[in-house]
């Protein structure tokens, strides 16, 4: 807030309303509401709720009153808020899981007034849900009434002049009387972690009831931060800078450490270099100076000014009358050399200030840390466990923070970028392997666009889309990253891409009921990476009743030597009472080399008395897979031909293999009994039973 000298003694020319719609973003409006709620309702804790992609139940802010009850606020920066909008907001709140079982919902809008129909809807819901508090709608007029007593908040978001002309005289006078002596910052307990630029974390499943941040997992470097905090507790002024690249957990570690400070400590987070220089002299003892991304304060591009900031900070730390002060900052490695660069044997204010202040934050979790996470699974947050299981090479924190950034990339992408990513999501959930060809993605993505979107897409739409989607997100790869290892010539676009684990999980949760159009399946026939992908797609198409697509994909897979899909297609036809039609597909699958199909074809030949063909197919199945049913079938053919000793040796070998071999012989005995060959059926049943009790020496019986 400005010094009192900037305010005139006589206050006049009042304005009637605040320009909420002129604020830079919905996020700024939400932040204003968050500060106002804390000021007028005295909620603690009070924080912005949820992460992108979560089912937030229509809640943007949540806070606890002194009586222990929780209130929720939904914030809408809109020019118009209708009865339909109100119904949707209230439906979300009453039907979805409510954070902390909050019983009260306040709808906050930037509209100049609230329609009678909106209030009627709210009162109607209140009547239907008497255990909840649902009738409150705060519009711009109501916000203005509350803000007339909050000149500090008004000045922060709209400027000093607006605050002077808008706020009540008594509130201004009270504020001006303390403007020169008021302590900077807020109590540490009231600090919003997201306001301190701690990254939002992924969600695990559909649970949004817990803490907005995952439970913290201590690592060895936390000891060094706690030493600095303990020094501050004992009266010393200290500076520590946590050093690590994007999304390694620096800010979260600092936030956890300051929770150990006594309740009289305050936290000040200057918004930039100007704010820091303008108010640094007002920093009082027992203040945490939060300098997240310290390069913003020491690397402005104006070396003289940067040196001035460093010198003022050093002076603050040396001043015993203002101790203790704890300066906590974070920095990326790329900024360290610039901030500490100086000619040899020369010193700069920045270099002196930062010497010995670094605490290195490892980018990855060690094997021991990952093991400890798993061993403490009953006490560890599900989000951390999910990240530990899926993160690449121990990059647990990056996965936690990068997931929401990847999801934001998807949600904020162009129609073409979203289409490409949705194709990748659908391909993975329908069974495609990790590597997706650019040809497949490009061919199918057009079918995910409307005709108008196709017409408006730029000529290089696919290249632009994959470049956007492959941009790194908070220390992790983009949602769709190029795959290394595929042969490419210089100047060509990447030929294959891989979907991030987090976005793949999002697709499985949110697109599970989507059945792609014919373009998807036809492109899969042409462009899938290998035969296994085509086979997987064939099974997926069959499960969705797309018979023609399933057949085309199965035939395409068979052409590349994968007969499993054709066998599955034939099984589906058989199951639906068309065994004769299925035989063609069994035979095609057998010729490709599918052992299951070879046994079925052999069985049909055996039943038809074509023993030569049956024996040939049984032997192929045995040689390629060692299947028990193939061995039993061959033994059956040998029996038909009078080769009893050879058949007995085969049965014995199958039975010695254990449970599954005995089960195969048992099934053969059942079939023989149905065919009226009771003597042989009884003998095989006896052998199967004996095999189940332990090893036996089998004798050749009458067959």
Image: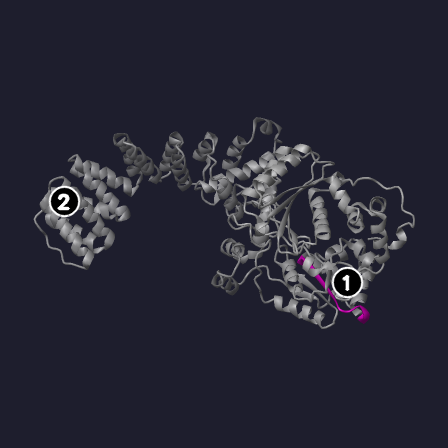
In contact (CB < 8 Å): disc 1 and disc 2:
no
| Camera-nearest residue between 351 and 204 | 204
Q: Name the residue rendered at 74%, 38% in the picture.
A: 21
**x 24%, y 54%: residue:** 659
State the SS at label 1. Answer: helix
Look at the image and tell me whether residue 148 can be seen: yes
Judging from the image, the colouring scheme is one colour
Q: Quadrant of residue 518?
A: top left
Which residue shows up at 13% across the image and 43% down it?
673
Q: Quadrant of residue 323?
A: bottom right
Residue farthest to the bottom?
234
Work out whether residue 610 or residue 384 is closer to the camera in this orientation and state it. Answer: 384
Residue on which the image places disc 2: 638
Residue sitting nearer the eye, 696 or 112: 112
**Few, some or many residues within 10 Å of mark 2 (<14, 14–19, 20+):** some
Q: Left or right: 22 with respect to 170?
A: left
The secondary element bearing badge 2 is classed as: helix
Which stretch is magenta?
Answer: 319-333
Left or right: where 55 falls relative to 610: right
Residue 531, placed above or below residue 298: above
Indicate which label's residue lies in the foreground, 1 or 2.
1
Q: Is residue 400 magenta?
A: no
Position of 378 relative to 688 (above/below): below
Is 342 rendered above or below residue 499?
A: below
Question: Residue 350 — which label?
Answer: 1
N-terminal of the pair, mark 1 or mark 2, is 1
Which numbered tag is attached to residue 394?
Answer: none
């Amino acid at each position: 807030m400005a010094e009192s000298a900037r305010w005139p003694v006589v206050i006049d020319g009042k304005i009637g309303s605040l320009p909420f719609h002129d604020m830079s973003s919905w996020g700024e409006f939400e932040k204003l509401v968050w500060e106002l709620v804390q000021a007028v309702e005295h909620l603690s804790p009070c924080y912005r709720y949820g992460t992108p992609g979560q089912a937030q139940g229509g809640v943007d802010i949540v806070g606890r009153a002194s009586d222990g009850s929780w209130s929720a606020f939904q914030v809408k920066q809109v020019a118009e808020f209708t009865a339909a909008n109100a119904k949707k907001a209230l439906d979300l709140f009453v039907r979805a899981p409510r954070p902390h079982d909050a019983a009260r919902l306040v709808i906050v809008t930037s509209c100049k007034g609230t329609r009678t129909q909106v209030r009627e809807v709210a009162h109607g819901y209140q009547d239907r849900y008497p255990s909840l508090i649902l009738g409150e709608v705060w519009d711009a007029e109501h916000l203005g009434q509350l803000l007339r007593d909050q000149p500090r908040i008004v000045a922060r978001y709209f400027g000093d002049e607006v605050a002077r002309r808008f706020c009540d005289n008594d509130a201004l006078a009270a504020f001006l009387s303390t403007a020169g002596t008021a302590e900077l910052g807020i109590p540490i307990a009231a600090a919003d972690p997201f306001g301190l630029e701690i990254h939002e974390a992924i969600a695990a499943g559909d649970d949004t009831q817990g803490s907005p941040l995952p439970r913290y997992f201590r690592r060895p470097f936390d000891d060094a931060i706690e030493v600095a905090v303990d020094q501050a507790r004992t009266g010393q002024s200290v500076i520590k800078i946590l050093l690590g690249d994007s999304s390694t957990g620096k800010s979260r570690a600092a936030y956890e450490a300051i929770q150990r400070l006594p309740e009289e400590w305050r936290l000040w987070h200057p918004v930039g270099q100007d704010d820091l220089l303008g108010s640094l002299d007002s920093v009082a003892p027992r203040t945490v100076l939060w300098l997240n991304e310290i390069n913003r304060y020491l690397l402005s591009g104006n070396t003289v000014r940067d040196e001035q900031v460093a010198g003022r900070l050093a002076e603050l730390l040396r001043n015993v009358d203002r101790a203790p002060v704890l300066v906590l900052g974070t920095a990326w490695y790329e900024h360290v050399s610039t901030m500490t660069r100086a000619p040899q044997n020369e010193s700069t204010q920045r270099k002196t200030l930062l010497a010995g202040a670094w605490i290195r934050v490892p980018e990855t979790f060690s094997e021991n840390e990952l093991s400890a996470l798993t061993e403490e699974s009953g006490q560890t947050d599900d989000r951390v466990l999910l990240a530990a299981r899926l993160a690449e090479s121990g990059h647990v924190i990056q996965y936690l923070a990068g997931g929401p950034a990847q999801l934001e990339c998807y949600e904020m992408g162009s129609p073409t970028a979203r289409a490409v990513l949705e194709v990748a999501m659908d391909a993975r959930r329908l069974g495609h392997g990790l590597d997706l060809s650019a040809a497949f993605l490009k061919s199918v993505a057009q079918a995910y666009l409307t005709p108008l979107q196709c017409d408006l897409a730029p000529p290089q739409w696919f290249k632009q889309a994959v470049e956007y989607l492959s941009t790194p997100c908070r220390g992790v790869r983009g949602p769709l990253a190029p795959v290394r290892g595929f042969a490419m010539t210089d100047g060509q676009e990447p030929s294959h891409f891989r979907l991030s684990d987090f976005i793949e999980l999002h697709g499985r949760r949110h697109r599970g009921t989507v059945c792609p159009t014919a373009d998807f399946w036809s492109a899969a026939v042409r462009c899938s990476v290998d035969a296994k992908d085509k086979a997987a797609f064939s099974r997926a198409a069959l499960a969705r009743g797309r018979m023609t697509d399933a057949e085309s994909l199965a035939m395409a897979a068979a052409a590349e030597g994968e007969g499993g899909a054709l066998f599955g297609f034939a099984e589906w036809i058989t199951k639906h009472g068309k065994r004769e039609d299925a035989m063609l597909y069994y035979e095609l699958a057998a010729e490709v080399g599918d052992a299951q199909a070879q046994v079925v074809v052999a069985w049909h030949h055996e039943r038809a008395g074509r023993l030569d063909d049956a024996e040939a197919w049984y032997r192929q199945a045995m040689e390629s897979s060692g299947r028990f049913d193939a061995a039993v079938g061959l033994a059956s053919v040998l029996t038909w031909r009078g080769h009893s000793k050879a058949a007995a040796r085969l049965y014995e070998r199958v039975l010695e293999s254990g449970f599954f071999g005995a089960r195969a012989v048992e099934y053969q005995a059942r079939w023989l009994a149905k065919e009226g060959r009771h003597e042989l059926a009884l003998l095989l049943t006896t052998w199967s039973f004996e095999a189940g009790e332990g090893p036996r020496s089998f004798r050749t019986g009458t067959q």
